[in-house]
Structures are given as C-alpha cells and as structure tokens.
Image (cartoon, rainbow, N blue to C red):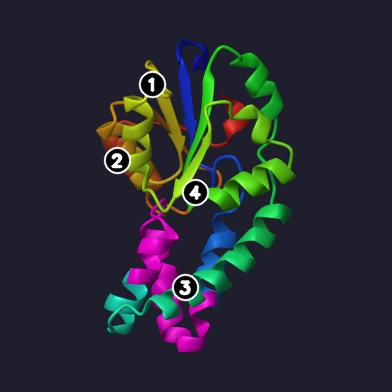
Amino acid sequence: MNLNKYKSIVFDCDGVVLNSNQVKTRAFYNAALSYGEGFASNLRDFHIQNGGISRYKKFRYFLTDIIGKKTNEEELNHLLSIFSIEVKKGLMDCEITKNLELLRKKTHKSKWLIVSGGDQEELREVFEARGIFKYFDGGIFGSPSCKDEILFSEIHNGNLVFPAIFIGDSKYDYAASVKAELDFVFLSGWSEVSDWQSWTSKERIKTVKMLDEL
C-alpha cells in the first residue's frame, strides 16, 4: 500500500501507535471495581464493544445505564481520576509500534495527526515524554471532543488536507473515517474487535496486522 499519495495521515493511538488497548480495558475495570465485580465487568465489556469512544461518555453511561443513577459530577470525576492515574502509567510503559521513525521518513511529505478517544492533554504529555510527539506535525487530538468532531474541525480549518487516510483498529475509527470521507486501513494486530475478520471482509476494508507493514 502506497501512503505517499496522501497529504494527511491520521492515526488512532491505542492499538495503532501504542500497544495500549489492554491498558485501557484493565483501567476501566479497576476504576469501577468498588461498585462490584459484576458492574466492573459490564463496564469493561461496554468499553471493548465501543472502542474509540471517549472515557467521558463511557463513564457517564456506566453511572446512568449500568448502575442506573443520575450522573453526579463529583462521582464521575472521581472515576475519571482513578482511570487516568492507571492509564498514564500504562501508556508510559507499553510498547510503541516498530519502525515509526522509518515510516515517518518514508512519508515525509505527508502531515501526520493523532485522532484518539484518549484524553488529549494526557496523550500530548505521554507522546512528548516518550519522544514521539515530534512525528505528528499535524497535531495530537483527543477527548473530550469525539473523533467525528475533531476530524470535521481539522478539515474545516485546513489542517487536515485531502487526499487523506485514517489508520485505526476499531469499528468507530472506520465509521468516523467514512463520515469524514477519508480512506481507511484497519490494523488487526493489537485490536480488540473480536469479529474483525468477518467484519472487514463484509465491508471490504483494507487490513494489515501491524503499522510497520505499511
């Protein structure tokens, strides 16, 4: 696959640039564990089924739909705080995809962006600390804005230029790319989408196992 034809390359973070999907899954479970193992498991399963959606929406759903109570901002912020502490440590320790610098050199004419469901400030801090912030000259974007909003905004302000491609590992990544009229490639190696083979075949989605294959 020739990425050089794209003026903009958009990457998801978890499961694409960082091997961090399990970090997030474990953190959702642990953050909710004080409510009981059953509720914590329900949140974990909801997270896996809705990869790419921001933590803010997932914890609100946890309180209102899984627990069945009105959202209390103090309670919500407490859950977010527990989650953030565990995730940040995990993001600092997890594997970075191989040959990222080489891919950057081979696509030096393309602008690189991160569009993630992860917390924006958290991602920027982690990418800076791990020495990979410099590759993403188009910016690193995340929640509380959702991917649809980010893509629309960056296209509208001229930062995301066509032709463009989104490289992701979730069904939401694909849906967001289609809505924004970006090409898409699915990375299977670290994805938590259990039915990815039948789904990508049905939708005729280009797939590769790992980012360095590109």
Any part of residue 93 in sight: yes
- Label 1 sits on residue: 158
| Pointer 4 or 2: first along the chain | 2
Q: Secondary structure at mark 2?
A: helix
Any part of residue 36 in sight: no
Image side of residue 143 versus residue 136, left or right: left
Judged by depth in the image, the label closer to the viewer, 3 or 4, is 3
> What's the amino acid at mark 4?
Ser
Q: Which mark is residue 175?
A: 2
Query: Quadrant of residue 158 in the image?
Result: top left
> What's the amino acid at mark 1?
Gly
Judged by depth in the image, the label closer to the viewer, 3 or 2, is 3
Indicate the position of residue 45 as horizontal and vertical percent values.
40, 68
Judged by depth in the image, the label closer to the viewer, 1 or 2, is 1
Gap between marks 3 and 2 measured at Cα: 29 Å
Q: Residue at x 52, y 48 (%)?
A: 120
